[in-house]
Amino acid sequence: MIVVLKIFFACFVGMAWYHLNGSDQAPIAVILFVMILLASFIKPISYQDPKERDEYRHKIQEAREKRRIITEKQKEERLILKKQALEAEEMRKQELKKKLKL
């Protein structure tokens, strides 16, 4: 219902401009109609409570910190896996060398 009223009001203003200023003002009436229509559908900026904003920032910082810790742990695990793979390869090489010497 309110959408219809907004459109009707914008049409009324555009038509009033057209009828009051003549047919040579038709483009301005259309521009006026569109501007009023857009202005009526734009939501105003709502008040943000500083406490809520700080809580939101804190949550974001915590999430970033958790993500950073997780990536560090993943890097450490990758390094450990690489070291284990290298050690296993060295063990295989040494066993192969021992087998070849016999």
Image (cartoon, rainbow, N blue to C red):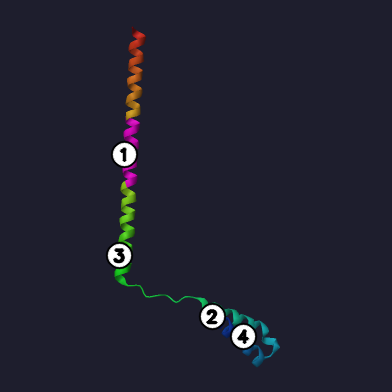
Disc 3/disc 2 C-alpha distance (Å):
37 Å
Q: Residue at x 33, y 17 (%)?
A: 94
Which amino acid type corresponds to the residue marked 2 in the rendered image?
Answer: Met
Query: Which disc number belongs to residue 76?
Result: 1
Residue 12 relative to residue 65: left or right: right
N-terminal-most mark, 3 or 4 = 4
Residue at the far top: name it: 102
Disc 1/disc 3 C-alpha distance (Å):
31 Å
| Dot in front, 3 or 2 | 2
Q: Quadrant of residue 4?
A: bottom right
Q: Is residue 79 magenta?
A: yes
Q: Position of residue 5 (x, y in %)?
A: 55, 83
Determine which residue is flagged by label 2: 1
Which amino acid type corresponds to the residue marked 3 in the rendered image?
Answer: Glu
Secondary structure at numbered mark 2: loop
Disc 2/disc 4 C-alpha distance (Å):
20 Å
Residue at the far bottom: name it: 20
Which amino acid type corresponds to the residue marked 1 in the rendered image?
Answer: Glu
Q: Residue at x 55, y 77 (%)?
A: 38
N-terminal-most mark, 1 or 3 = 3
Disc 4/disc 1 C-alpha distance (Å):
67 Å
